[in-house]
Amino acid sequence: MAKGFGSSSRARGKFERDCATCAAASRCWDDPAPAASEIRAQRAPGLDKGTTLVTQGDPFDAVYLVASGSVSLSELTVDGALSVVGFRFPGDLVGIEGWALGRHRYTAVALEPTTVCRIGSPSSDRRSGGGALLQRLLKKTARQLDASAPSWRGLPARERVAAFVEDVARRTHNENFARGPRRLPMTRAQIGSYLGLAEETVVRAMAELT
Amino acid sequence: MAKGFGSSSRARGKFERDCATCAAASRCWDDPAPAASEIRAQRAPGLDKGTTLVTQGDPFDAVYLVASGSVSLSELTVDGALSVVGFRFPGDLVGIEGWALGRHRYTAVALEPTTVCRIGSPSSDRRSGGGALLQRLLKKTARQLDASAPSWRGLPARERVAAFVEDVARRTHNENFARGPRRLPMTRAQIGSYLGLAEETVVRAMAELT
DNA sequence: CGGTTCTTTGATGGCCATCAACGCTTGTGG
DNA sequence: CCACAAGCGTTGATGGCCATCAAAGAACCG
């Protein structure tokens, strides 16, 4: 099974792109810029706010890279509650967790107008580029695993929210979240679900962020 | 940079093993058993309880696979507190988070007599097996990313501890944690640090697990 | 304008962090 | 063997933070 994930037989649609020619590639890929034909992605049509990218339980077919906008990852828990597991911003990977299991673990929904690129078969058994793509994906996943360690575990609610805002600001390269309401793409309820806090607590905490 | 991580020039010591000949390989690697010479690992000498495997901040040089025993991952936070980030059991990967950054993010300490295997260079640019190892590592990392989604976020303390015990039991294939004290390899304080609870709360919660 | 979703503010009670103290186990040295 | 120390586990009392309920503004959209 040296075959990569995704259906390698999928025809190259008109959205097929070479990452080497994409101006935003530096946001998606690490240090060495992708060589020509090293990584082929399919730029999906723009997603409206509220559009579901993948649904929990769907068979795993590909992994997505956020190009612009933002995405929420939510999970239907055993108690029937829908809880937010994380958020993804430009350059972040969506759906890799489902690879091992064979089906997607989370539902990914666009929080705002969003564009994503679909990464299908890395064709790892054909060209040497396959290994390079795997290496890039592994590094990205490792980075995400690193970032998934909640640095706010056990912190009081106010610091937890503050750490969240800083984290979002850093990951979106946007420093202006403190001022003005509704600069954050997700709702207070979603933040609360993600942080394990009540919506009202998030509101009160953000009001005290000076 | 198609080179893998680790120093590929490191001589093959007397601990060098071929995963294809290891009886415990099924615990470490997924479905297709490793082919001969596909994965070479270095079985390290047994670690005593309390031995530090990697230290936070150390330059990243390799990734480790837990063969037996267990390991705690802890992080020195900005407030100077040492908080537990996770635990690793046989078959789990240790240290992959440090790859992207170039240095280890967490300190890994053996919770009991433990053996690990060191995975060095995948030699991805030489044989086709390099891609296969990368694929295995990526799948393992993705699985860990999946498991790192705390299913206990926002749960009350009792259910949080219950979920933790179940998780450990599942990952160690050991169902007998409920009965008898001190069957868990980590201390109550470490569990509390990991779950974001006080040590006393963990004690009280475990006493009520019937 | 009417409906919906999101945000905000207030009041109350319960859960859990904190402090304090003690028993238990293990290891070490006299 | 015993004394001592150190680490871990356990139990109790108290106060504060935060979840919950309730209700009303605010923004958005057809």
Image (spheres, coloured by chain):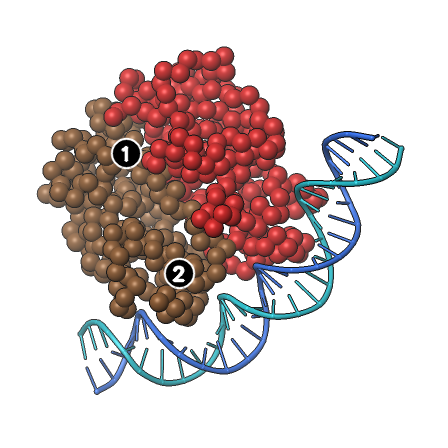
Chain colours: A brown, B red, C blue, D cyan
Residue type for callout 2: Val
Write the residue at 13% across / 42% down: A23
SS at circle 2? helix
Tell me where residue A128 appears, x and y as whole percent: 22, 23
Write the residue at 36% across / 15% down: B9
Residue type for callout 1: Arg
Give the residue number, with chain letter if any, for mark 2.
A161
Q: What is the chain letter for disc 2?
A: A
Where residue C27 sits, quadrant-wise, is: top right
Give the residue number, with chain letter if any, for mark 1.
A136
Quadrant where the C terminus of chain A lies? bottom left
Q: Which of the two residues, B55 or B4, is positioned nearer the viewer here? A: B55
Quadrant where the N terminus of chain A lies? top left
The answer to whether marks 2 and 1 sit on the same chain is yes
Label located before the other in sequence (2 or 1)? 1
Identify whether A15 is placed above or below A51. above
Q: Which of the two residues, A35 or A206, is positioned nearer the viewer here? A: A206
